[in-house]
Amino acid sequence: MARDPSFFESLVVKLLLKMGYGGSVSDSGFTTQKSNDGGIDGIIREDKLGFDQIYIQAKRWDPDSTVGRPEIQKFSGALRDEGATKGLFITTAKFSDGARASADKQHIVLVDGARLTKLMIEYDLGVSTVTTYQIKTLDTDFFNEDNE
């Protein structure tokens, strides 16, 4: 939370790339310019020619705050201006019921702070593994009579 908004926008793009979006397309994910970005903070190119793209809005807000319907509507307008069909609104905050309803109608995927945290842990972004445990069980196939 202490880092600037551009760090958060970059983190979101890195997360999507680690999740497999953009595939093997070189330079498939990038953040847009810092100001006058038209409401789009990042873009993931899903194919080599750029026919299919995911447009991203990243909001680093206080985790106790709530993103409302107006923010989703602004992002929806930005997507229309780009001729976009895929939008992801990701935040460190929460979403109101109105924001969720608006996003569903506009086919915008929402990721709140809790889900963002889980995804970062799952895809090893910004975390390091300290200890790994292995639990062993008996391999009955090894002791099968056919395995001599």
Image (cartoon, helix red, strand yellow):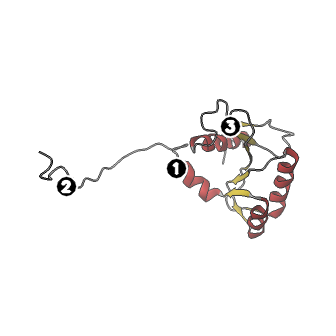
Give the Cα separation between the discs numbered 1 and 2.
34 Å
Q: Nearer the viewer, residue 22 or 133?
A: 22
Q: Residue furthest bottom?
A: 97
- Amino acid under label 2? Thr
- Amino acid under label 3? Asp
* Secondary structure at numbered mark 2: loop
First in residue order: circle 3 vs circle 1: 3
The x and y percentages for residue 49 are 73, 33
Side of 39 relative to 109 (left or right): right
Q: Residues within 10 Å of mark 3 (few under 14, many from 20)?
A: some
**Vertical placement of 91 versus 98: above or below?**
above
- Amino acid under label 1? Ile
First in residue order: circle 1 vs circle 2: 1
The residue identified by callout 3 is 47
The x and y percentages for residue 121 are 52, 50
The x and y percentages for residue 141 are 20, 52
Q: Nearer the viewer, residue 74 or 34?
A: 74
Q: Nearer the viewer, residue 33 or 17?
A: 17
* Secondary structure at numbered mark 1: helix
* Secondary structure at numbered mark 3: loop
Q: Nearer the viewer, residue 44 or 73?
A: 44
Residue 121 - label: 1
Residues at badges 3 and 1 in contact (C-beta under 8 Å)? no
Quadrant of residue 97 in the image?
Answer: bottom right
The residue identified by callout 2 is 140
